[in-house]
Amino acid sequence: MPRLGLVIASTRPGRAGLPVGRWFQKKAEAHGAFDVEWIDLAEIHLPFMDEPHHPRLRQYVHDHTKRWSALVEEMDAFVFVHPEYNYGMTAPLKNALDYLHWEWHYKPVGLVSYGGISAGLRAAQQIKQIVTTLKMMPMNEAVSIPFVAQFIKDGEFHPNDVLEQAAVAMLDELARWEEALRPLRESVRAAR
């Protein structure tokens, strides 16, 4: 079964990303197209880029980078659960993306964004620009959560029907793209 990396992109204490991520993890597991791997950037705890060589060379010297590389390499698709900070993506997510190069190639990515009135959409647009440079395929289907606090009660996320349907639509599309991009990923892995 293909592996889906569910990346929690906020590392801030009290972040809404944890309850949103737990909800989405259950949705993805129930969907059944992927083996879901929880990847919390607060637990990964990558320092800001500290590798002396460009990531495209894959000459990593730090153990944290080697572990991050191996984890990303194992995944076939991703979902980023992310807020919007000052009209942009989180620094930990940008840093995590920048650490690697080849490991991201030909993997579809879905976005679960949250925030206030904008639902994190400006950050989602920024992420799309970056991941396409890494030869990832961002999904048009997305889960965009406006005024996220209204859906969180006692530490649990309680979505409405629109969000539930958006999650299924995005997972369906991720499964299609994962299968379509699989030959490209396999050819790149075989060439290494």
Image (tube, helix red, strand yellow):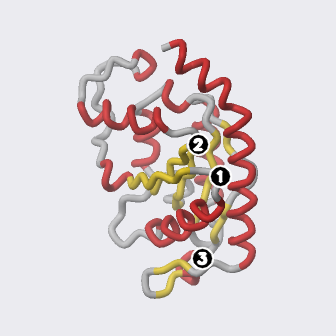
Looking at the rendered structure, the secondary structure element under dot 2 is loop
Q: Indicate whether 27 appears above or below 59.
A: below
The image's mark for residue 16 is: none
Assess whether mark 1 and mark 3 are in contact (beta carbons under 8 angstroms): no
Residue farthest along the bottom direction in this orientation: 154
Mark count: 3
Q: Which residue is mark 3?
A: 147
- Residue indicated by mark 1: 33
Q: Earlier in the sequence, mark 2 or mark 1?
A: 2
Q: Which residue is mark 2?
A: 2
Image coordinates for residue 192, horizontal then vertical, percent:
48, 14
Mark 2 and 1 residues: CB-CB less than 8 Å, in contact? yes
Residue 76: x, y in percent?
57, 38
Mark 3 or mark 1, which is nearer to you?
Answer: 1
Which amino acid, mark 3?
A: Phe
Nearest to N terminus: mark 3 or mark 2: 2
What separation in Å lies between label 2 and label 1 (alpha carbons)? 7 Å
Q: Position of residue 133 (x, y in %)?
A: 60, 29
Q: Return the residue nearer the eye: 54 or 41.
A: 41
Structural crowding at the residue carrying mark 2, measured as other residues with C-alpha within 10 Å and reported as few (<14), some (14–19) or many (≥20): some
Q: Count neighbours of disc 1 (C-alpha within 10 A) and say few if under 14, some if 14 to 19, many if 20 or more.
A: some
